[in-house]
Image (spheres, grey):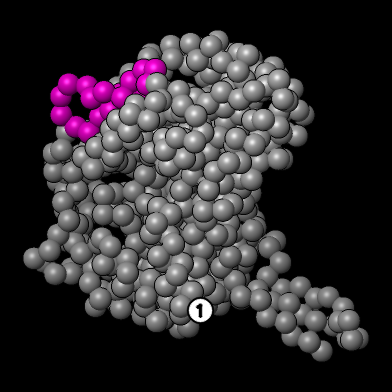
Amino acid sequence: MTLLPESPDMYELAASYVAGKWAAGNDDEKIAVRSPATDELLGTVGIAGSAEVDAAVAAARAALTSSPWCDTSPADRAAALGRLADGLAARKGVLADLTTAEIGSPRSWSTFGQVLTAVGVLRAYAAITPDYPFESTRPSLAGGRVTVRQLPVGVVGAIIPWNTPLFIAALKLGPALAAGCSVVLKPAPDAPLSIGLLTEVIEEAGLPDGVINIVNGAAATGQALTSHPDVDKVSFTGSTVVGAQIAAACGSQIRRCSTELGGKSAAIVLLDAPLESTVSGLVGGVMGNNGQLCAALTRILLPRSRYDEFCSALTAAVEKLTVGDPADRTTDIGPLINEVARDRVEGFLQRADAEGATILTGGKRPAGRGWFVRPALVAASNAMEIAREEVFGPVAVLIAYDDSQGDSAAVNIANDSRYGLVGAVWSADDDRAATVAAQLRAGSVAVNSTAVLDFGSPFGGFKESGIGREGGPEGIAGFVEYQAIIR
């Protein structure tokens, strides 16, 4: 009941990994993991029920109270994070192959987008943790002094999505372990295999048993974890609908909770933006990982006086993208994760057409097996559904703004969204772009690039894009409780 390590014909993954050992759940219940490119069976994964979740949470609690982990120093924890990063880096090839197989990420994208991003996050926390102010002293306003301590919040239930599982796992494990917490990690049922291989890295890194535990399953497993009375904090990345449900449940139990949710992020093209480099960046910013990224720049705001110029260039660039086998390194766009996702994207495009939007290119199914949709550009207004809802596929919406009114016209459209995860601004003048970037109601904004996340800086959203931050020292702050000792 373990994950086979060397690209077998079929993977078999047990229901849970608890205190350093894999354990079976109900052998009559398994989840089939299928290739989104061919619909062929890649493997099976067991389902953790309430008993397996109980065991995982108990192991995590024991790691906090009776294992070497509870006495580790920040330097010790930093060293452990560094070893985790090294273990992932050493397996980058097999992990990239595995995520390409189970998610459909183009192999040309997987090494960095799926694996090295996780390595970067863990190495950032290895660097941040030794000097983080877990204890500081300040003068008391009443005389004397106050020692402020930042203590681990406790057992963390971490729920991750299928689209970038290793990266999102690192965004949760990094700050949680830096703070001294223990973790019960729940992968998405569509993409559990790379997280299964992560257990080899955990063991190789020498982490005490119970510091990181894994429970596999679908919604019922997640609900058992988030409602468990001995979980101190829930950290969730996924849809806004599910995030709202988890936040409400945590609120009713006065349980700590952080969420990183959906996005409908805007890329503003200012009037002076250079054509070639801007178009190249925009295509990468929306089509990476087949458009299945919460931080995809899916609304492209173009100055009306240059709209036709950019529209033509973007259409030509998108039509050059190669759609096909994600394992082929010449492929730009692979499949969507499953049939439901493919049908959902097609539904958005059909409704956009009915609403009066213009599909400039793409949106059709190529011949053959798998859950493919050709990358699409849609000319629309910001009021249309396709410009307001997260499509989660290779679809970019082109929106014209009246540049005669200045940059504020673009800012107003960009901020007219219930989401506020990321953004980007493109201009020949970095300072001008940065000035516009500062006006966006978004958690992070890139200037003349699609680098909307820095490994050592906070990542998270405004409005319905979530609560809290992951990344940087600010990420650690979300996994601690503050205690003041007044003398």
Picture coordinates of residue 434, whole percent (x, y): 73, 33
Q: Which residue lies at the image location 42% right of the left edge and 42% below the top edge?
A: 390
Task: Answer with the quarter of the image where residue 351 lies.
Answer: top left
Q: Is-magenta flag for residue 250? A: no
Task: Answer with the quarter of the image where residue 469 lies.
Answer: bottom right
State the residue in front, 483 or 79.
483
Q: Which residue lies at the image location 52% right of the left edge and 72% below the top edge?
A: 256
Mark 1, residue position:
254
Crowding near pointer 1: few (<14 within 10 Å), some, many (20+)? Answer: few
**What's the magenta region?**
359-376
- On-image quarter of the C terminus: bottom right
Q: Which residue lies at the image location 69% right of the left edge and 36% below the top edge?
A: 437
Q: Can residue 113 be seen in this snapshot? A: no
Amino acid type at image mark 1: Ile
Return the residue found at the far left: 28
Q: Is-magenta flag for residue 370? A: yes
State the residue in front, 447 or 340.
340
- Count every numbered label the image shows and give the total: 1
Magenta-colored segment: predominant secondary structure: loop
